[in-house]
Image (cartoon, rainbow, N blue to C red):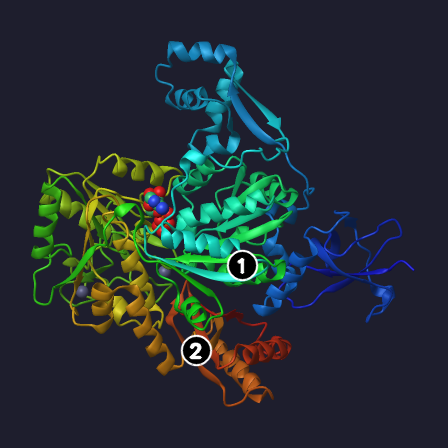
Amino acid sequence: MRPTIAKVALPVPLDREFEYLIPGHLFPVIGARVWVPFGPKKLLGIVTGLSHQSEYDVNKLKPLTTLLDHEPLWPDTLYKLILWGSQFYQAPIGETFNNVMPGALRKGKPACKQAIRWWQLTDSGKNQLMQGFGRAIQQAKIMHALEAGPLTHQQLLELDVSPSALKTLTEKGWIVDKEQINTPQEWPSQLVDESDKRQLNHEQMLAVVTLNHVEGYECALLDGVTGSGKTEVYLQLIEAVLEKGKQALVLVPEIGLTPQTINRFKRRFKVNVTTIHSGLNETERLNAWLETKSGECGILIGTRSALMTPFADLGIIIVDEEHDTSYKQQDSWRYHARDMAILRAHHEQVPVVLGSATPSLETLANAQSGKYLHLELTHRAGGAQPTRNFAIDVKGLHLESGLSAPLLAKMRQHLEQGNQVLLFLNRRGFSPAMMCHECGWIADCIRCDAYYTYHKGSGEMRCHHCGSQRPVIHQCQNCGSTQLVTVGVGTEQLEAHLQTLFPEYKTLRIDRDNTRKKGSLDSALEAVRKQEYQILIGTQMLAKGHHFPNVTLVALLDVDSSLYSSDFRASEKLAQLFIQVAGRAGRASKPGQVILQTHHPEHSLLQALIHKGYAEFASTAMQERKLAQLPPYTSLTLFRAESNSFALCEEFLRQVRSTLEAHPLFDNSCWVMGPSPAPMAKRAGKSRWQLILQCQLRSTMQRLLSSSKAAIELLPNAKKVRWSIDVDPQDLS
Ligand code: ADP
Ligand code: ZN
Ligand code: ZN
């Protein structure tokens, strides 16, 4: 008997599926997309079940409107993993499906390759190029961009060209566009460029040989100091996988997906290397998804969102910089891509490699307990030496724009030897606050618990938390004085100051404020490699993945706030940052130095880091976590509530607390902390509260959450506040 009722998961914040009648002419399968009526709206959902009977009155069910797919969107193992992932992170199933689908599929586009719009020069356009363009700068830009060959519409837009210039040039007959679907490409018989390969050193060889012998699932931590040749290990592992006709998935952090990285893979392999990241438009993203699903691409490199892409025949998963916080999604389906990658590998019975010079304590604990293989690369490859590290005690020293005299002397010394210097300050803008010199009033954002950052260049005050901005204030709003002074130092101020201190050297600042435009970061990095600049100032952005062979001195200007933060992961993050930043220096034959300016040079964490390295730090930090009963020794879930009303948030979380505590599974291995105001108690006009559930056993926590969620959803205030459940939270602010 054919089923008459379909269960459908819809992108609504309700943790249930909905039932629809199946019209006689439609034959849905589980995992296919359908359009259905939902109240006054039409929604796209995924079929999750087929049956003959309903818990509800069949006469009241509405029929499905349209069936979009004749086969499931995901292979069975991946489909099951999505269901599992939605339960693990307590996210509604419909939202989870919505999250793992490319945007084009979410909108109901067919699951087949779409045409991409290409631009190219016509013959008369080529002739025109010889003759020049006078003052039509925009037009010249387009013509020159197309000189080397056709570009997609998206690529041209990324070069910041104006659509009107495209139109003018088309009307002149100098350029044409056409829509084209890329034809599927077979893998070549020769898979790699042998000349690009390196002779592996002993440790690299051991890692490759060990992992090549793995059959089925295995999780390995590739724990290698920066520059130890982890990427070379990935490349050779992937080669062996491709030889078996299987594909590879490589995950990289948001910041790590540079053209440099992608080119390294493209140089080595002759198979299709596909990328998925936030810069793609919908069509490109869909095509990449389909190329992976069909087996056309050999290697998929992507950020977090690439993880749930279906593969024809997956052979290995690599998670580079596994400690990176960008792997955790902060809204909707709050999954950790590293942890889901491990699960995926388990479901698909393939090896997964977690690479890092600074593994997270969670991963280290698993490696030490024997749950993961622990492969170590202890030396820098290619002969580069480890850096020499030391702290400058800045207690009582005069700091000029955050720089001490001993640091300035060091900088001069390195610059005079023709080397580059990298200064690291994780604070954008001119100064992080502006204060009244008469009464001490500080300009703060009305919508957040935060001060305005002063941006001198744009003449604005900006709140880095809600994004609001206003013109610079010239008068105190408390006492009326016009004596306003800046407090603290940001990258913009540091840049200005260095230009006056070292007029003979060129200074370059790289932060989010001046690299917003597509391609501007790459051109800045290129200029650094060409040594057009000697002094580099950077934020977090510069900490990862880039090679600066001529940088011989790296200094971290202000790390003290991380030593005494309320976030228990702050010290781990500082240590990771320190090692990553230090890894930028002296990559080539020149030895590097790393200097830390601090008021607390005696701090045990800094001492361990500076003199003994990350492993020593990690073992100290692990002891502390154990004593404090924090992850990885316990598991956490964070409940957040947000509302215009302070009282509603508190009341709701109080009810959540009672619900949890009343549950039979809640025993003396579980604790609840809160409700309490979030460290940032107000953001974008909303009060913010939180409640932390801590359990000794993950399994208890999971069962407790799964079986309390329905009751929490029914709490009287659950519809009045915005709330969320964050399993394994990374950000406690
Ligand atoms: P990581 O990913 O650990 O930071 P990379 O793989 O980027 O390190 O390697 C750092 C540098 O060392 C690169 O320039 C790479 O080409 C080189 N390299 C890697 N392995 C070897 C090797 N076995 N012999 C010589 N050079 C190597
Ligand atoms: Zn704000
Ligand atoms: Zn004042």
The residue sitting at 38% across, 9% down in the picture is: 131
Q: Is residue 240 above or below residue 377?
A: above
Between residue 712 and residue 503, name the one nearer to us: 503
Q: Which mark is residue 588?
A: none
Instruction: Give the number of marks.
Output: 2
The residue sitting at 40% across, 76% down in the picture is: 677
N-term-proximal mark, 2 vs 1: 1
Asked whether residue 545 appears in the rendered view, the answer is no
Is the shortest distance between ligand 1 and the CB of mark 2 under 8 Å? no
Q: Does residue 105 appear to the left or right of 694 in the view shown?
A: right
User: Residue 80's quadrant in the figure?
Assistant: bottom right
Q: Secondary structure under badge 2? A: loop
For the residue marked with disc 2, what is the amino acid?
A: Tyr
| Position of residue 246 measured from the top left corner of the image (x, y, whole percent) | 60, 46
| Position of residue 722 measured from the top left corner of the image (x, y, whole percent) | 53, 68
| Position of residue 512 measured from the top left corner of the image (x, y, whole percent) | 33, 48
Question: Residue under circle 1?
Answer: 341
The residue sitting at 53% across, 46% down in the picture is: 240
For the residue marked with disc 1, what is the amino acid?
A: Ala
Q: Secondary structure under badge 1? A: helix
Q: Is residue 658 above or below residue 608?
A: below
Q: Does residue 21 appear to the left or right of 234 in the view shown?
A: right
Residue that extends furthest to the right in the rendered view of this protein: 1
Between residue 89 and residue 512, name the one nearer to us: 89
Question: Residue under circle 2?
Answer: 633
Image quadrant holding the C terminus, namely bottom left
Cα separation between marks 2 and 1 = 21 Å
Assess disc 2: are there few (<14), some (14-19) or many (≥20) residues with their C-alpha within 10 Å of its C-alpha.
some
Between residue 623 and residue 578, name the one nearer to us: 623
| Position of residue 430 measured from the top left corner of the image (x, y, whole percent) | 22, 52
